[in-house]
Image: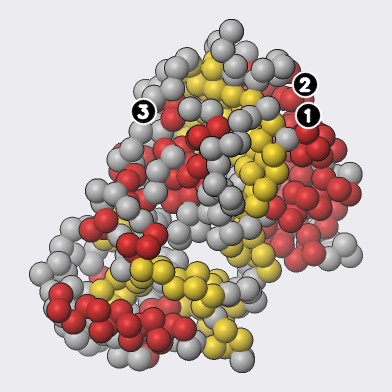
Amino acid sequence: MNAKTVIIGLDGVPYAMIKDFAASGVMPNTARLIDGGFFSPMRSSMPEISNVAWSSMITGKNPAEHGIFGFMELHPNSYRMRFPNYNDLKAPPFWETCQGKSVIINVPSTYPVRGANGVLISGFVSIDLNKSVYPPSLIPTLKEFDYRLDVDAQKAHKSMDLFLEDVEQTLQARIRAARHLWNYCDWQTFMLVFTGTDRLLHFLYDAYEDPNHPHHAAFVDHFRTIDGVVGEIAARLGESDRLIMHSDHGFERLDYDVFVNHLLAEKGYLHFKTGQDAIIENICFGTKAFALDPARIYLNYKGRYPCGTVEAAEAEAVLRDLESLFAALEIEGRKVIRSIHRKQDVYSGPYMDDAPDLLLIADHGFNLKGKAASDRLYSKGIFTGKHTYDTAFLLAANCDTSRLPAPPAVSDITRLFT
């Protein structure tokens, strides 16, 4: 009998947090897996956002191979925004190429679903349950389970207690669905992703850091519940079966959101039409560069964009000026940008033309945002946690890890089972 593979995703959870909860007794089942397996920090995608990272994980490819570079993209030859989805993924996910049936639950950026050999329930950002489930015959059962496609994050802006209640209900419904689907078919690969972790880390990272925080216990209990599921699954696996746990990016404390397009406009690299809102759709002539979320910098090439300004011959000079600008950026005496990367140093593949010219990685405490309509360089919102590039985690039990680089990246995970 072929070895089965189970993958448990914990969206956004950093290596140090898993290590902490395993050592402190919050996650004893995970601790046992760590003791007998491979446990390492892991690099995310660039940028370190969920739709790019999960697309890289499920395909084993980088964005220039699978075509997903961010949450928002521009329509060709325009500044009009579009939201890429599962139909835009240009490399096949592992469940379309591996042998046997798969049960895939709540993987981000798999909406709208398409036919699969087994089960596919899409994750963030899913809008309509009827377009989120394959086979559709499962929809009535999921409704009976009170299955939710995602946490209602808007509740956190009204009441953190209501938000936490919704997080718990969403988690329990996800667990009910996973238990049911475990026996739904004779699967070869079973994948279950928990995304409530990311929501908690955004809104309540401070609750993790502070044991006296009024929501610290609820935060910890969420991970204790997940660990119970980990133990339940581990107990069902055979001696030769593989168990993989991982996150898609890490998290850390957030001090300030930094608006990259505000800086570009302030320094004369970005211009908007007179009397129009300061949004990407209203870029005008004279613009040399603009940012798409979170910190993807695109040169405004002549011939590529309606108001293109930059000639190919001057691109190198503009890139150097931008690198100097970002490298020198400080807020309250602190360095904002940790590293600056050119696209050829990050990506390789047939979709390089769609890649940003520069990618920025923020230093500790800073969250980079491409938002243009801001009257200030930085601010502090409701979030207390932000994504990180190199603090994700990978835990592999009963796997051959010899093919993994050190440290591994999210796009390397499929090497463990394909």
The answer to whether residue 302 is above or below residue 356 is below
Q: Nearer the viewer, residue 211 or 56?
A: 56
Q: Residue under circle 2? A: 235
- Quarter-of-image position of residue 312: bottom left
Whole-percent x, y for residue 22 in the image: 82, 45
Q: Is residue 22 left or right of residue 126?
A: right
Q: Is residue 114 left or right of residue 11?
A: left
Q: Quarter of the image containing the N terminus? A: top right
Q: Along the polypeptide, which appears first: circle 2 or circle 3? A: 3
Secondary structure beneath dot 3 equals loop
Q: Is residue 211 left or right of residue 330?
A: right
Residue at the extreme front of the image, as rendered: 402
Identify the residue shown where x is 42% and y is 38%: 59
Task: Mark 2 and mark 1 in contact? Answer it, CB < 8 Å.
Answer: yes
Identify the residue shown where x is 55% and y is 42%: 404
Q: Is residue 119 left or right of residue 24?
A: left
The answer to whether residue 87 is above or below residue 1 is below
Residue 231 has which mark? 1
**Disc 3 to disc 1, how far (Cα)?**
31 Å
| Mark 2 or 3, closer to the camera | 2
**Disc 2 to disc 1, how far (Cα)?**
6 Å
Identify the residue shown where x is 27% and y is 83%: 318
Q: Along the polypeptide, which appears first: circle 3 or circle 1? A: 3
Residue 114 has which mark? 3
Whole-percent x, y for residue 76 in the image: 18, 58
Residue at the extreme top of the image, as rendered: 1
- Quarter-of-image position of residue 180: top right
Dot 3 amino acid type: Arg
The answer to whether residue 407 is above or below residue 96 is below
